Image (cartoon, rainbow, N blue to C red):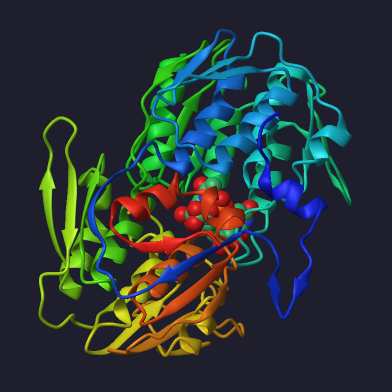
Amino acid sequence: MLANRHSSFDRNPPVIIGGFPLSNDVLVVHGGTPLKGEIRVRGAKNLVSKAMVAAVLGDTPSTLHDVPAISDVDIVRGLLELHGVRTTMSGDQTLRMDPTNVVIAGVDEINVHAGSSRIPILLCGPLLHRLGRAYIPNLGGCNIGGRPIDFHLNALREFGAVIDKQPDGMHLSAPQRLQGIKYTLEYPSVGSTEQILLTAVLAEGVTELRNAAVEPEIIDLICVLQKMGAIIKVHTDRVIEIEGVDRLHGYRHRPVPDRIETGSWAAAALATHGEVFVRGAQQADMMTFLNVYRSIGGAFDIDDGPDGGIRFWHPGGELSPVALETDVHPGLMTDWQQPLVVALTQAHGLSIVHETVYERRFGYTAELRQMGANIQLYRECLGGTPCRWGRRNFLHSAVIAGPSQLHAADLQIPDLRAGFSHLIAALSAEGTSRVFGVDRYITRGYEDFDAKLAALGASVERP
Ligand SMILES: CC(=O)N[C@H]1[C@@H](OP(=O)(O)OP(=O)(O)OC[C@H]2O[C@@H](n3ccc(=O)[nH]c3=O)[C@H](O)[C@@H]2O)O[C@H](CO)[C@@H](O)[C@@H]1O
Ligand SMILES: C=C(OP(=O)(O)O)C(=O)O
């Protein structure tokens, strides 16, 4: 039985007294110690889970190396198993997936995964191709905005899928082989681009996708699909062309490293005046982050030899304020925003952060304010570019006045990256904080973070 902390939590919510769950899902953090040492990042959460879904498209087994031990991987593994894909994980975190006998899973079994992650919707195309029908439970993922799935559903309908939306999930069928489409995304959504890729590769004819997302994890998914036998051309200006083929086989793949985890530890090094070597991190996909890091006053050094990585540190002196906008790739990734904001509470002056990808990704700043940070939220687009959330009553711009001496607090984590940013804040604050919800949220995307914190000399304990 695979671990699924989310669904078991959802079915058996802990007793809550005084606003905090009474469980051992808490990390006690004695702040004030600079993080110093080395940790390793594995394959990116946002590629590994999609590559696992891609394995369903093949008619022979696939092997994925360097899979992180995170709960999102457990969830997708559980979903694949329910669909008859046999999975085995070896000691070095290599995952083998055998999709020879894909079956339709029971609705009740699948609903155990309702609300657990965003990944189930990506199974639509692969299951429709393999079985002619699919059942997709309601999605989960971080609560950072409305996160509609209209682009996914519109595209699937154009491919020829019939969709029956029910309160507890979606039943889909493909009365005949899905057909290639010409589709323009309203916004370069990562998930919708992956949906279209995973559906188009086995559809009949050519699919032309315009305004596609081109995040490094998407390019890596295209590499996976190409290894499986797909024909995919990435043109300039966000145009992707997919020539449908009749069959795909298994793949063997080593994923791109997790650039979000890398950025998170980098921000932690800066906020705690520390020095962290992130083994496995690669420069190319971190370029935008590295520019921002340097502008703030952080230092880094790149070792691009075999088994190299990136060393991040606070070089001493004052950190500088910056004006940032999150954006689709190659812009500054939204998932870096939350850890970076904690580092910006230590910069001297006013920083501006305009979140243009999600409309509600600043909720976590309430706890930072409680710790002494000076952060004001605004409905206006404070960056250079008006975004989709301007004039629509969303607090999606932040002004951070620093530096602030953070002090300890009890913190309730609201989502994955916010959780890591709360952890960074607690590590850099004076005194002892309790961070609640670490197992529920942080394990979604950070492998073995207790051990990594210990390796970096953090003073943390489990009560
Ligand atoms: C598992 C995974 O890979 N998650 C990542 C993925 O999320 P995810 O794939 O869910 O994010 P999207 O890129 O799809 O979402 C971006 C924006 O598009 C909107 N949208 C999306 C789909 C749709 O049908 N309609 C619509 O309006 C969303 O509400 C959001 O405002 O990309 C995000 C943007 O890089 C990252 O923050 C997430 O970490
Ligand atoms: C938003 C994130 O993930 P998800 O899309 O899985 O909720 C994230 O990884 O920060």
User: Does 227 sit above or below residue 281?
Assistant: above
- Number of marks in the image? 0
Q: Is residue 256 above or below residue 456?
A: above
Q: Tell me if 93 is positioned left or right of 184 in this view.
A: left
x, y percentage for residue 333?
Answer: 38, 59
13 shown above or below 93: below
- Give x and y (percent) for residue 365: 49, 80
Task: Please state, as top left, top right, bottom left or bottom right, where the N terminus lies in the image.
Answer: top right
Q: Quadrant of ligand 1?
A: bottom right
Residue at 66 percent across and 37 percent down: it is 3
Give coordinates of residue 342: x percent, y percent. Answer: 36, 75
Position of residue 299 relative to residue 430, above or below, is above
Q: Is residue 23 visible?
A: yes
- Name the residue rendered at 46%, 14% in the picture: 229
Q: Say whether residue 18 is left or right of residue 440.
A: right
- Looking at the image, residue 178 sits to the left or right of residue 134; the answer is left
Looking at the image, the residue that sits furthest to the front is: 463
Quarter that holds the C terminus: bottom right
Q: Nearer the viewer, residue 200 or 216?
A: 216
Report whether 151 appears left or right of 193.
right
Camera-side residue of 382 and 20: 20
Q: Quadrant of residue 178?
A: top right
Report x, y in % for residue 109.
Answer: 83, 33
Asked if residue 186 can be seen in this view, the reply is no
The quadrant holding residue 108 is: top right
Q: Nearer the viewer, residue 201 or 355?
A: 355
In this orientation, which residue lies closer to the viewer: 84 or 225? 84
Residue drawn at point x = 61 percent, y = 21 percent = 56
